[in-house]
Image (cartoon, rainbow, N blue to C red):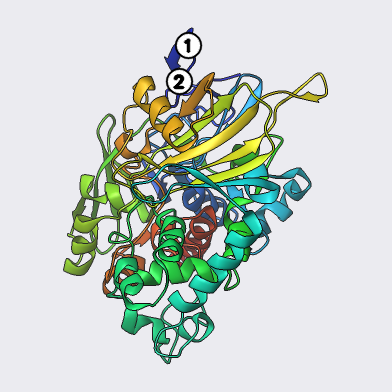
Amino acid sequence: MTQTKEGFFWSPTHSYNGLETDAVRISSHTVAQSYDVVVIGSGFAGLIAARDISQKRDIKVLLVEGRDRIGGRTWTAKAMGQEFEMGGTWVHWGQPHVYSEIRRYGLHEALKITSGTGDLQRMMFKPKDQAVKDLDPQATDALLDQIAEKFFTVNGQTARQLMPFPHQPFRTPAQPWEQYDHMSVRDRLDQIEATEEAKQLLEAHTNSFGCGTAEDTSFTEALRWFTLGGYSFQGMYEAVGMFKLGNGGMTALASRILDDYQGDILFNSTVQEIHQDQERVSISFKNRPPIQAKHAVCTIPLNCLSDITFSPPLDPTRLQAISKGHTNTGAKIHFSLPTTEKGWFANTPDATQSDYLMSFSDSNPSVKGEAQGTNCIAFSYSGKLQDPGANEAIISSFKALRPDAEVQAYLTHPWATDEFAKGTWYCGGPGVTTRYLRALQKPHGRVAMASGDWADGWRGFVDGAVEQGMLAARWVVRSQSV
């Protein structure tokens, strides 16, 4: 088993950086100075682009990665005899691009269910300035459906009417959602008539879309999640938080894609500059000589693009988007509990008194065929719990949301301070989509720009990364033939 330099494990007896994973790879034995195409980044956008381009005849491809592993913001760690998804996790047949890849490699047989969303037995909620209390799951779901219908119906137009084509955000004629992109979730909550209890319940759920507050998240960002999930919270949670891969997890999928790639690969190589003229692209690195190519694919995340010098420079609109970045810097933490618990879910809109916005049970590990203990996942509000070694703060804050829980271990990856991520999954603030999305998606000269951070549909998800990698490959192959 190989060990990456990334990830952190804590238990009362020991802690360490660097977790075991199948995602670690080695560079090609020899790397040339010139290629037809260089793909920057081996997350899912980069893997898909590199595979698809390399399978075309007579196109020589190099895949470049700054880390020591594949997967980008998605990788599967191994600890305590189990698998843990450190980043992107949940998949669904309603996520068309990634599910197509799962089915292509026969991994659909390995799908399993997260207990806190698929087998919910207990629901907990912390209202603002109050203690955690138990809720009736069925009654709470009914209340959430009622408030969601009010929230997502604007000026007599339902969610289906506002965003009928969520995978085509700028379809012609324009969809009605565009005229409401300036609003935050808070703006929309203030417009509707509902009880404070109902508003706080909805707010807690929409906060989870980007580990932020109602002020941070745009109304249309919440609408996009809701519509992609089939215009219901139940459908959305099934699509984004119920099904995940076993038997190697998301790293198994990434590995299958890499196995079909027919080119060279270079790890531990950090890109500094992308220079181009009318005929060539030159990629400069921190630790090795430049590499030339006819075209390039840049899959660097939005929050990291400011670290790269582009020559000629990017257009002003794209530079504004990069300067603004996206809002999600929350932490994802796996907790191991000694008690064997049935499915549970807990959340809160109280970003003032709680470092965590949400937690839920994931699985019950099996020991000699019997369930023993509980694995659960917690997400912090953006900017909180950024130090993975601050175990006292991490555990005490968790117990504020789950007062009866005892923690025997935890694992995490500090995405917010990761130099190749600088955040978790994408979430946009008010006005961002209409102002920046088109510009972010455009090629920059001979460089295709491909990231799940600016996907059409499942933006911020692995599905969005696969979508963008596929589109980038198509553009590059077409450009190579010109």
Residue 381, position in %: x, y? 35, 45
Q: Earlier in the sequence, mark 2 or mark 1?
A: 1
Question: Label 1 is placed on what type of residue?
Answer: Pro
| Residue that protrudes farthest toward the right in the picture | 369
| Residue that protrudes farthest toward the top in the picture | 13
Front position in the image: 409 or 120: 120
Q: Residue at x 83, y 23 (%)?
A: 369
Residue 16, position in %: x, y? 43, 15
**Left or right: 458 as drawn, with respect to 371:** left
Location of mark 2 (residue): 18
Is 388 placed above or below 205 here? Answer: above
Badge number at residue 416: none
Location of residue 114 by image quarter: top right
Location of mark 1 (residue): 12
Look at the numbered discs 2 and 1 and tell me whether their residues touch, using CB distance below 8 Å.
no
Assign the C terminus to one quadrant of the image. bottom left
Front position in the image: 314 or 251: 251
Q: Disc 1 on helix, strand or loop?
A: loop
Front position in the image: 166 or 334: 334
Residue 294, position in %: x, y? 36, 56
Q: Residue at x 47, y 61 (%)?
A: 468
Crowding near pointer 1: few (<14 within 10 Å), some, many (20+)?
few
**Left or right: 473 as drawn, with respect to 309:** right
**Left or right: 110 as drawn, with respect to 272:** right
Residue 50, position in %: x, y? 51, 50
Q: Is residue 136 visible?
A: yes
Front position in the image: 164 or 118: 118
Question: Label 2 is placed on what type of residue?
Answer: Gly
Q: Nearer the viewer, mark 2 or mark 1?
A: 1
Q: Disc 2 on helix, strand or loop?
A: loop
Crowding near pointer 2: few (<14 within 10 Å), some, many (20+)?
some
Q: Residue at x 45, y 30 (%)?
A: 399
